[in-house]
Structures are given as structure tokens and as C-alpha cells.
Image (cartoon, helix red, strand yellow):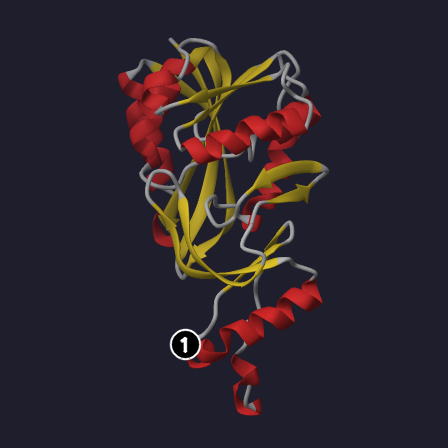
Amino acid sequence: MPSHLLSLIPSKWEKIGEVLILKIPEKTASYRQEIAKVYAEVLGCKSVLEGVGGIEGECREPKVNHIYGDKDTETVHVENRVRYKLDPSKIMFSSGNMSERIRMSTIVDENETVVDMFAGIGYFSIPIAVYSTPKKVYAIEMNPTAYHYLCSNITLNNVNHIVKPLLGDNREVTPKGVADRVIMGYLRETYRYLPTAFASLRNRGIIHYHEVCPNEFLETRPFQRIKEAAKQFSLHITGVKKRIIKSYAPGVSHVVLDVDLERG
């Protein structure tokens, strides 16, 4: 590759187990395999994928192309001593959410029942089960591929006695009136799923509500959406904590609200 293009090679990447995801600048596209080979060797990866379009659809499928190495891109990613088996060419994994996964792993009481409405491969459900050992975690996932890995990861981390996987649209399969805590780890119009989350709560509980929001509306929009929906279910908000997880795009943040609610 010409020396004048070296300044354009990727300065950021995502390493998931033994699989690397790169974004190749257009001006260096004709050298993508050469670039991928070097990164794979330096970072100890068996495969390299090129990220070409973010995450798509309700099933949260990544848009990537294989550009180097082993075409079998299934791998095991270890984070906080939790093992996640997945195929990054088919399933998303956001390293930027690591601090939130770690936070959630120890926030749950051992007597609680948790409903994880968007479980994926077990991003939150499994660390919670490993570190907090709650009474039960209902892990709901509609993507059959993600559900397959969710079931594998439950066994891989020895939490079969805690985590119950449920395949389907959470609006149809979420158990009602069982939850002390509900996780809404989804970023696409999450507020539309609030009725399902409220129905799953006992008389009181906590909802962890995730949203992508323009920074100028961070102080108002996420809370207002929860407040308006809660009124319709005769739920009172007794406490709120807000946490910015990461920058999602210029001027846009991924935020989570921990909302305490009770019926009255």
C-alpha cells in the first residue's frame, strides 16, 4: 500500500473473541485484504469482517462483509469472566456497552425475578445470573439465531437453573405480573414496548429503560415518555436515575433511565 495512504488506515476496531470488525476508508478500499491481514496478525484474530452499514431491523442484524481469514466466524468472547458464544457476522455485540453490562451484573437482589425483554445472546441476562444469582431471569429474544446463542451461553456459563429463555416477540410472550425488575435494552422506539414492560411488573418494581436521544432532549424526552405511559397503567414513579452509556452519533447519546414504579 502506498505510504501516503497509511494515515487513513483504521485507528479504531472492534475485537469480538477471535473476530475483528474494521471499517475500511473508501480511499484504501482496494487494499482492504492487505490491511485486514496485518490487523489480524497483530491482534491475533482468525477472521476479519468489514463493517458496512451498522445494525439493521428489529432483529438487530449487523451489516458486515467477510474480507480475510477463516470464513467460520463463530467465536467465544470473554468479558468480565462471562463467556459469550456468537457469530459476529450474524449477531451484534457492542463493546461500547460493556460498562453497563458490568453495572447491571451486580445491581440485582438474589430474591428478585428479572424480565429481560430484548435478551439477544444474553448480554444482560447472563452476567446478572452469574454475579447476582437472582431467583429467576426470563430472557426473551425474537431472533432465532440470537436465541440459539442465548441458549448456548446459558449452558456455557452454568446458569440453566436461573435463566429461562423464551423465543418470540416480547409483546406476545413476556410473562405478566412476575417481575421485580425489567430490562429494556433496545434502542429503536423503545417507548412502544413500555406497556409490555408495565404489564410484567408486580405491584412495584424497576424498569431499566434504554433510548437513543438527541442531546438537547436528554433532560426531558426519555422521562416524559415513561411518565406519560405510566399514567395509563396507574403506575407512580417514585425514583429515577439517569446514566449516559455512550455517544451514539454526533449530538446523540445512548441513555438509560433506572425508574422505580409502584401501582396505586
Q: Residue at x 47, y 71 (%)?
A: 24
* Apparent side of residue 128 relative to residue 250 in the rendered image (left or right): right
Picture quarter with the N terminus: bottom right
Q: Residue furthest right?
A: 81
Q: Residue furthest front?
A: 71
201 is higher (above) or lower (below) than 193:
above
> Which of the image's four quarters has the C terminus?
top left
Residue at figure coordinates x 46%, y 45% from the top left: 90
* Residue 26 in view, yes or no: yes
- Mark 1: secondary structure: helix
The answer to whether 140 is drawn above or below residue 185 in the figure is: above
Q: Is residue 120 left or right of residue 158?
A: left
Residue 205 at x, y percent in the picture: 49, 17
| Nearer the observer, 249 or 42 | 42
Question: On the image, which quarter does residue 210 sit in?
Answer: top left
Residue 9 percent across, percent down from the top left = 54, 76
For the point 37% across and 17% down, the residue is: 173
Sort mark 1 into few (<14), some (14-19) or many (20+) by Cα contacts within 10 Å. few
In this figure, which residue is indicated by the disc labeled 1?
26
Q: Quadrant of residue 197?
A: top left
Above or below 51: residue 35: below
The picture places residue 143, in percent across and down from the top left corner, at 40, 33
> Callout 1, which amino acid?
Glu
- Give x and y (percent) for residue 160: 63, 18
User: How many numbered callouts?
Assistant: 1
Q: Is residue 119 visible?
A: no
- 18 over 26 or under it: above or below: above
